[in-house]
Image (cartoon, rainbow, N blue to C red):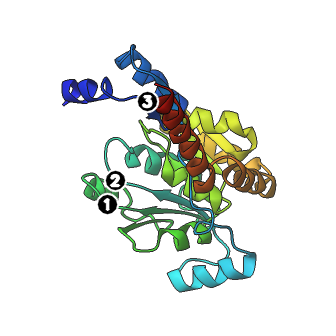
Amino acid sequence: MSFVHTRCLKRLDLTVGVSRPVTENLRKLVPHVTVTTVMNGVDTDVFEPVNEFEKQQIRNHLGFSSSATIWLVSGHLSQRKDPITLIEGFKNAFGDDCSQLLILIGAGPLEDAARSLTQGCGNIRIEGRVSDVRSYLQASDFYVSASMGEGLPNAALEAMACGLPVLISDIEPHHQLLEMKPGIGVSFETGNAVSLKKGFRTMMDCDIQVMRQSAIELTKNELSARAMAVNYQNLYDELMTLGAGA
């Protein structure tokens, strides 16, 4: 598959990476192919922040505490997403403190292991697959990802568009997000539950309203679906112009 993929890329007029790290990897994989970057975008008309009253209504509907600080994890429960480190880091940081609540939405091969690890934990809930991710985001306070690999994480973009500060692993695509707007969150060492514990504590000491506003501004101004569409349209226009000139 790698051979076929590379061969196909060589036949394209232009290859697009969804983040700077992806673009750099493409240049190494196929050095003679023209590569550029168009970052993924989120639909900010769908994923949007809510006010405190609306947030409490959503929490009531989902059966969540009205006063707890909610940390949301959205994604496949697989080795690549590393839910085990997430759960261990949360337990190390907060123990059985029910004022802190970890919610995991999604399913996958590590679901049984994750459920086993959370037995007896009243402040960790594994919801499985859900039909309305947006409601869970809008009900939460923070977004957490321990992912070991991403292109540019759509789940994190959706969370930021809903106003959630992010606690994310230190993989390159996550670093790019933090470099674009440092105030949106904090990173921790990938696969390290001790580093994640420190990350939880650091986030608790930050001004959540400032981080929340930074996350909203970044997605609206630079990482919206509209911005992504305009960037792709400009690339197609350039290619058409070059083709006409040839």
**Marks 2 and 3, how far apart at CA:** 34 Å
Which is nearer the eye, 10 or 134?
10
Q: Is residue 211 visible?
A: yes
Left/right placement of residue 34 relative to residue 7 reads: right
Earlier in the chain: of badge 2 and badge 3, it is 3
Q: Position of residue 32 (x, y in %)?
A: 39, 14
Task: Looking at this view, name the residue that lies furthest to the front.
Answer: 245
What residue is shown at x 31% (from left), y 48% (from top)? Answer: 78
Mark 2 vs mark 3, foreground winner is 3
**How many numbered circles are shown?**
3
Which is nearer the eye, 63 or 143?
143
Give the residue at mark 3: 14
**Marks 1 and 2, how far apart at CA:** 5 Å
Q: Position of residue 233 (x, y in %)?
A: 55, 46
What residue is shown at x 62% (from left), y 39% (from top)? Answer: 177
For the N terminus, the quadrant is top left
Q: Mark 3 and mark 2 in contact (Cβ < 8 Å)?
A: no
What residue is shown at x 64% (from left), y 63% (from top)? Answer: 162
Give the residue at mark 1: 107
Give the residue at mark 2: 77
Q: Amino acid at mark 3?
A: Leu
Q: Amino acid at mark 2?
A: Leu
Mark 1: secondary structure = loop
Which is nearer the eye, 107 or 230?
230
Q: Amino acid at mark 1?
A: Ala
Mark 3 vs mark 1, foreground winner is 3
Q: Mark 2 and mark 1 in contact (Cβ < 8 Å)?
A: yes
What residue is shown at x 77% (from left), y 48% (from top)? Answer: 206
The quadrant in which residue 8 appears is top left
